[in-house]
Image (cartoon, grey):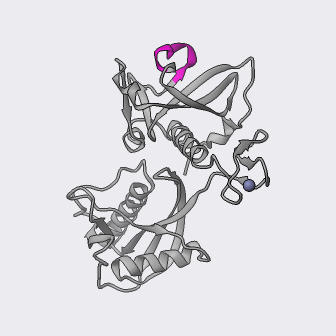
Amino acid sequence: MLKKSINERFSFTFVGRESAEKIVICVVNGSILVREREFIFSIHDIDSVKNYCISTLMLGTCGDFDYEVWDLSDDVCYLEDYSVINLRELLISIDELNFTLACRAVQLLEWKKSHIFCGACGNATEIQGPEHSLSCIRCSKPYYPRISPCVIVVVTKGEYCLLARQLNWADGLFSAVAGFIEAGESAEDALHREVFEEVGILIKKPQYIGSQSWPFPSQLMLGFMAEAASEHINVDGVEISEARWWHCDKMPPSVPPPAVLSGLLIEKFLISAKGLENQNKW
Ligand SMILES: [Zn+2]
């Protein structure tokens, strides 16, 4: 989905360089520290923040700069000029590359903090080598950042698409159907199962559109469009409170923005459906 991959600019590594200028991203309980809408700081500009730093982690290199992520205590919130915003808020105010960087910083830090000890033998883990992995000091078992793949799909039926809302969402917000891929499933298997389980609809012709890292907490969203093979909606009432067929001219009061994959899929449906409408008028 990214037009320009972050890997073209960054080398993600645990090994820093003595001579490099340090750049810092600060994380407070999984959220990002900002000052005047900026969240990427030169180490020289954040002296007042240093006292709140619990631990640091090398993130990667970019040109002459080494990027670090700092884990800060809550008390930093009392500092004048600084505030904390979560990744969802950050998403709508920065470009994709910086959002990817912020996501990676938060996810790596959380992964490191939750793998202090080896799950096999209980001894401590340590950083070994430049790649982002940890290794047990006793049994050498390696630990890599864990990613959970999910599928998300906009199901269409001509000029209509199926959007649903979860029980805990804000009023009026509808989005694509999504769910985790279970062990042993293909992405397509998961699509058929999730859509049927959540809204009772059969689908056909799933078409892969693109993917997006989704750090809530460590997901990789795989986005699809699919055609409906049945019409009657039957919501599960557990995850989904309401689902409807929406005409492209009468969409829900609120849908996700195109910056997120679900919003992009919905936008793709609208472009396609309105094209279909125009064709029908000819
Ligand atoms: Zn071990």
Quarter where residue 12 is shown: top right
> As drawn, is 64 to the left or to the right of 92?
right
Residue 79 x, y percent position in the rendering? 37, 20
Compared with residue 37, is residue 193 higher up or lower down, i.e. above or below?
below
Query: Residue visible at 48% across and 79% down?
Result: 192
Compared with residue 30, is residue 215 higher up or lower down, i.e. above or below?
below
Q: Is residue 57 visible?
A: yes
Compared with residue 151, is residue 47 higher up or lower down, i.e. above or below?
above
Q: Residue 132 or 112: which is nearer the viewer?
A: 112
> As drawn, is 209 to the left or to the right of 166?
right
Quarter where residue 160 is shown: bottom left
Prevailing SS of the magenta stretch: helix
Residue 116 x, y percent position in the rendering? 63, 46
Query: Residue visible at 45% across and 55% down?
Result: 261
Image quarter for ligand 1 equals: bottom right
Q: Is residue 3 visible?
A: no
Residue at the outermost front position: 122
> As drawn, is 229 to the left or to the right of 251?
right
Q: Residue 266 or 116: which is nearer the viewer?
A: 116
> As drawn, is 246 to the left or to the right of 3?
left
Query: Residue visible at 72% across and 28% down?
Result: 16
Query: Residue visible at 34% across and 17% down?
Result: 80
Q: Which residues make up the magenta segment?
A: 41-49
Residue 257 falls within the magenta-colored stretch: no
Residue 53 x, y percent position in the rendering? 52, 26
Residue 246 x, y percent position in the rendering? 26, 69
Give the number of marks. 0
Q: Residue 94 or 218: which is nearer the viewer?
A: 218
Quadrant for the C terminus in the image: bottom left
